[in-house]
């Protein structure tokens, strides 16, 4: 009898194990396999490792010699930096002085100032080439600093500037005129809000719209709604993708409170599709189509430019196939597909990334340029997903507010923006954008190559990123030479150059000439030398430095 009982218990345990435990183990294993092998794919591990990295920095002597260059090269570097430093002092005195002052009180500036280049070089470089973070005017494709210097704007104002600053100035002025009688009244809507909502409905192919104040907020709301309606907790984001600075979409370095309900999966990978297919706890998949330019890599900032291994390659067809595969699995599994178009919406096409890649999401977030130059975040979604309450359980609501939502001035500028992008001349610009920017970048690369310069540009329409074709520890210096040539980059440096669509061929050609001149100067000044060193060896060298710094 005892035996029979034992056997029954063992049998039951085996069944339970088979039915309950094994699938869990399998699902866990599938999740692990769907992580990208880089540290960006292992957010927790990246955070742990980041905490182990000690501060150390190069002395003035080491600054010029970290790649063991010979003394003739070192002398060139010292002389080159002296010339550049004198030029900066002469040319940007007021802008640099105000920036120094502001850095004491504006935390954002203190952060961006420190993280323009790898931290080991940062302090000495700042003392020689102070950054300038103030401007006082913009016109055409130019911005002007406090010393009266004009720069070609390659910052794109973090992606807001798609159609040129004058375009947005007129959206803001005209928008303000349209709502001036109401003024800054909040709560009740200006009638323009409905017009904007109708237009966004049409553009997104979705049923309802909600207005927010930033892209981050829009993403928060889209995810919150997806969780509410699916009853599932987890969100999927792809390795390297930025979706704002909200906790749940930033599981890695930069967030002191890592979320517990975020899966970071490998972009463009069958294994990730398997996870979506098999797990039952996924509420939504967030997609930032900008990643098509550098799948699985984080935003390419120069502070991480330790060597020359940064790469990029945009393959529109492959990414389209990927999005369609996600679409299919999301439909099958009841997962909400959210296209986060905060960056690329209205840049790739007037209908955004959905039009460009020919895919229909369940929810779309927009931001940046859609505000016509003013702050904005928007969620568009299917009617069933946008609903914030349940008919059958009235106390179970999904709350979302925001004092400045649907601000009349933002709505006014947005209305003008949405009208203008429908005008013939702007439609024409959009229709030719891909061909034009591909041709321009190809020409630039041909010129760089013909001079043997170790710089290569990749683009996704008008968004460009620079990579370096020869191993070097000094690539981040390039941004300072570009500035001296009158090219304004954002604080992330050469990883992201954002052109507005009002760049003429002549403007672009001048930018190319200046970029090439900057690259020549980098070479003449000895920062890029022919070397036997590989990127792997550079990484090894830096690991050695970190190891020694930890033991010191
Ligand atoms: C794809 C994407 N989503 C969300 C955000 C966050 O938008 P915001 O900075 O307006 O909060 C950004 C900002 O760069 C973004 O690129």
Image (cartoon, rainbow, N blue to C red):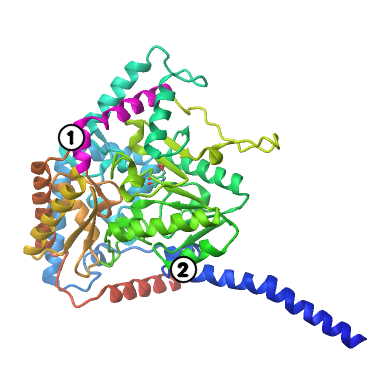
Label 2 environment density (alpha carbons within 10 Å; few <14, some 14–19, many ≥20):
some
Q: Residue 394 lies in magenta, yes or no?
A: no
Where residue 152 sits, quadrant-wise, is top left
Residue placed under numbered mark 1 in the picture: 147
Q: Is residue 415 visible?
A: yes
Does 345 sit above or below residue 58? above
Q: Residue 51: image x %, image y %?
A: 48, 63
Residue placed under numbered mark 2 in the picture: 271
Of badges 1 and 2, the one in the foreground is: 2
Q: Residue 414 lies in magenta, yes or no?
A: yes
- The majority secondary structure of the magenta stretch comes to helix
In the rendered image, the quadrant that contains the C terminus is bottom left
Q: Is residue 251 visible?
A: no
Does 253 sit above or below residue 139? below
Residue placed most toward the observer, 456 or 49: 456
Sequence-wise first label, 1 or 2: 1
Q: Residue at 34% across / 49% down in the picture? A: 358
Label 1 residue SS: loop
Residue placed most toward the observer, 547 or 227: 227
Residue placed most toward the observer, 516 or 229: 229
Q: Residue at 30% across / 51% down in the picture? A: 492
| Magenta-highlighted residues | 408-431
């Amino acid at each position: 009898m005892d035996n029979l009982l034992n056997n029954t218990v063992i049998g039951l345990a085996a069944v339970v194990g088979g039915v309950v435990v094994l699938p869990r183990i399998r699902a866990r294993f599938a999740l692990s396999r769907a992580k990208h092998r880089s540290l960006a794919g292992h957010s927790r591990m990246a955070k742990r490792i980041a905490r182990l990295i000690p501060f150390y920095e190069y002395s003035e002597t080491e600054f010029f010699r970290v790649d063991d260059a010979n003394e003739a090269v070192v002398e060139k570097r010292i002389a080159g930096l002296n010339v550049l430093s004198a030029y900066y002092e002469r040319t940007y005195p007021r802008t640099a002085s105000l920036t120094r002052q502001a850095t004491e009180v504006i935390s954002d500036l203190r952060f961006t100032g420190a993280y323009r280049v790898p931290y080991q070089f940062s302090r000495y470089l700042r003392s020689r080439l102070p950054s300038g973070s103030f401007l006082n005017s913009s016109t055409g494709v130019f911005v002007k600093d406090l010393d009266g210097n004009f720069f070609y704007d390659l910052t794109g104002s973090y992606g807001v500037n798609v159609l040129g600053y004058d375009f947005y100035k007129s959206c803001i002025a005209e928008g303000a005129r349209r709502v001036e009688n109401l003024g800054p009244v909040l709560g009740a809507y200006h009638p323009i809000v409905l017009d904007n909502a109708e237009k966004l409905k049409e553009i997104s192919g979705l049923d309802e719209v909600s207005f927010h104040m930033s892209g981050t907020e829009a993403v928060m709301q889209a995810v919150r709604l997806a969780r509410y309606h699916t009853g599932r907790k987890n969100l999927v984001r792809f390795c390297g993708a930025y979706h704002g600075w909200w906790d749940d979409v930033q599981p890695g370095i930069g967030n002191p409170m890592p979320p517990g309900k975020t899966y970071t999966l490998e972009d463009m990978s069958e294994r990730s599709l398997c996870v979506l297919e098999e797990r039952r706890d996924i509420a939504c998949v967030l997609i930032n189509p900008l990643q098509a330019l550098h799948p699985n890599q984080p935003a390419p900032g120069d502070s991480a430019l330790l060597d020359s291994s940064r790469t990029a390659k945009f393959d529109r067809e492959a990414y389209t196939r990927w999005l369609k595969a996600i679409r299919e699995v999301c439909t099958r599994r009841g997962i909400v597909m959210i296209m986060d178009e905060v960056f690329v919406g209205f840049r790739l096409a007037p209908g955004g990334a959905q039009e460009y890649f020919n895919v229909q999401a369940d929810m779309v977030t927009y931001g940046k340029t859609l505000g016509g130059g003013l702050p904005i975040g928007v969620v568009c979604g299917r009617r069933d997903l946008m609903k914030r309450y349940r008919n059958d359980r009235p106390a179970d609501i999904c709350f979302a507010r925001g004092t400045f939502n649907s601000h009349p001035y933002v709505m006014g500028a947005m209305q003008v923006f949405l009208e203008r992008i429908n005008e013939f001349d702007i439609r024409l610009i959009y229709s030719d954008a891909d061909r034009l920017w591909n041709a321009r970048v190809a020409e630039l690369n041909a010129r760089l190559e013909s001079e043997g310069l170790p710089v290569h540009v990749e683009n996704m329409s008008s968004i460009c990123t620079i990579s370096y074709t020869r191993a070097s520890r000094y690539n981040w210096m390039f941004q300072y030479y570009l500035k001296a040539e009158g090219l304004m980059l954002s604080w992330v440096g050469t990883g992201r150059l954002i052109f507005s669509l009002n760049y003429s061929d002549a403007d672009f050609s001048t930018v190319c000439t200046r970029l090439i001149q900057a690259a020549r100067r980098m070479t003449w000044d000895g920062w890029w030398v022919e070397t036997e060193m590989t990127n792997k060896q550079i990484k090894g060298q830096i690991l050695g430095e970190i190891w020694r710094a930890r033991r010191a």
